[in-house]
Image (cartoon, helix red, strand yellow):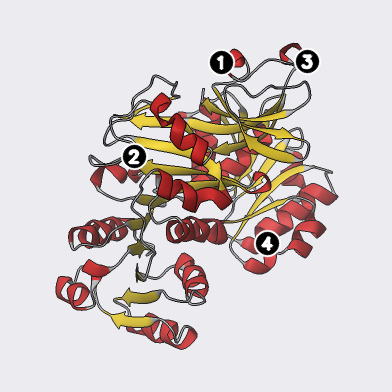
Amino acid sequence: MKVCIIGAGVVGSYLAKRLSRENHEIAVVDVNADKASQLAYGYDILSVNCDALSVNCLKKVESFELFVVVTESDEKNIAIATLLRSIFGKKRVIVRVSNKAFSSPPVKEFLGCEVVNILSETVQTVLSQIKYPFAHGAVRLESEGIVILKYLVSLNDFLAGKRISELKSVREEVDFTIVAVEREGKVIIPKGESFIFPEDRIYIAVKENRVPELVRALQIRSEPVKMVFVLGYSKFTEELLSVLSDFKGIKVKFFSPDRETCESVSGKFPGVDVFHGEFTDVELLKEEGIGNSDLTVSLSDDEETNILASILAKKLGTKKVCSLILHPEYENIVESIGIDVPLIPRKLLASKVYRQLSRKGFLEVFELSDSLEVVEMTVPKKFSGKTVSELRDSICGLIVAVKKENETKLAKGDTVLLSGETVICIEKRK
C-alpha cells in the first residue's frame, strides 16, 4: 500500500522504517529537510520537504492511500487531517493527538478519521497491570469480550512442565486457550503435545469476565495492587495520576527532583503523596516503602533515567516495574534487564496503522508482540463444515475464537466452522 507519514519525529521515523521493510511504498513529509532526507538515505522512502499545512505540499502526495499524521503539534495534526479529508477527499487518515478534547467522540465524528490519543493508550497499558497484576501484558479485543494475557511461567508454577493436552480437565472448568509461547527469543504457536517450561512467556486467551476463574483454576498467585510509585513527570504522568487518583484502595506516591513540579502535582492531586527527591535516592525510596510497593512506573522524558530508576526499584523490592521508552534503540534490551512492562507509545500507534494495512480478507489486525498478530478473517466456503482441528494451518496459524450468531466463543478442536463466519486467529508476523 502507498502510505504517507506526515512528521519525521521518533514515531514517524519508526513507522516509516518498519513499513518500508515490509515493502509498502512510503513517503515522509516534514518541514525539516534533514529529518526526511536521513530516512530516504537509508531506506526506500520518498522524502518530501514541505509544510503539510500547505495545500500545495499535500498535492505532492495526493496519490497516496493511507495518511498517518504524527507531527509534534496536536493542532497541526488536526488541521492537516481536516485538509486531507475536506479538500482531497482522503478516507484513510490516522491522527496522533495528546489532548483529550481532540480525541473526544464529537471531534472524531466531525473529522471522520481515526484519532489516536497516545496518552490515553499508554495509560491503559499501565491500568491493565492494576487490573491483571499477575500478567506482564494484556490485549483486549473489546468488541469480543476476550482478553489475551501475557504470563511469565515460574519454576513452581502449576503450568510448569505440563503438556498443553494435560490441561484438558482445567479447560473443562474454565474455557481458555494458550495461543502462543515465547521461549529463548523464539515464538511458538503451540499444539497439544507442546510442553510449557519455566521462564516461558505464554499468551492465554480467555473471556474477560472469566479471568478470576482462570486465575484460580491455574493456581496463579495474584494479589491486588495497593501501592503504586510514580517516578518522574511528563505529559504521560498527569494523565496517569488523574486516573489513579480516582481509584479507591490504592496508595499513590509521586517523586520528582523538581520542586515546582512537586508543588504543581500536589495542588492538582491532593490524594497523591508527593516527594521532592531524586529517583536514585535509595534512602528516600526505602523510607517511603518501595520494597512493599506493587507497581513502580517511571515516566520522565529521559528514558535512560526511567530505565535506571526501574532497575533500582526492582532491586529494592517493588513487585513490578513499567518504564516509558520513547526511542527504538532501547526497546530490545529492556525486558532482558528486568523491566517487566515497557511502555512504548509508538507501538500503540503502529497497531492502529496495521489495522488499516491488513491484507484482503482480514477485518482487523492487533499487534500482540513483535512477531505475533491477532487477526480476524472470514471462513471461506471451501472450509465450511470442517472442524477447527481439521483446519489447523489451513486458514491461519491458530484459530482462537469464532463469532457465531452475534456471540464470540473460544474455539475448541471440535468446533465446526461455517462459511461466512468470522474467526479470530493468531499469526506469526511475516
Q: Amino acid at mark 1?
A: Asp
Whole-number angstrom distance, CA of label 1 to CA of label 4: 39 Å
Whole-number angstrom distance, CA of label 4 to CA of label 2: 30 Å
Q: Which residue corresponds to mark 4?
A: 103
The image quarter containing residue 370 is: top left
Q: SS for tag 2?
A: loop
Q: Amino acid at mark 3?
A: Lys
- Front position among marks 2 and 3: 3
Q: Which residue corresponds to mark 2?
A: 332
Label located before the other in sequence (1 or 4): 4
Whole-number angstrom distance, CA of label 2 to CA of label 3: 42 Å
Does residue 368 appear in the picture of this structure? no
Label located before the other in sequence (4 or 2): 4
Q: Nearer the viewer, residue 335 or 96?
A: 335
Q: Are marks 1 and 2 in contact (CB under 8 Å)?
A: no
Crowd band around label 1 with a 10 angstrom C-alpha radius: few (<14), some (14–19), many (20+): few
Q: Nearer the viewer, residue 155 or 425?
A: 155
Say if 190 sits above or below 367 in the image.
above
Q: Are marks 4 and 2 in contact (CB under 8 Å)?
A: no
Label located before the other in sequence (4 or 3): 4
Q: SS for tag 1?
A: loop
Residue 189 falls left or right of residue 340 = right
Say if 220 sits above or below 124 in the image.
above
The image quarter containing residue 417 is: top right
Disc sitting over residue 393 in the figure = 1
Residue that protrudes farthest toward the left in the picture: 283
Quick one: quadrant of the N terminus?
Answer: top right
Q: Amino acid at mark 2?
A: Asn
Residue 71 falls left or right of residue 62 = left
The image quarter containing residue 359 is: top right
Q: Residue at x 78, y 54 (%)?
A: 82
Residue 3 falls left or right of residue 337 = right
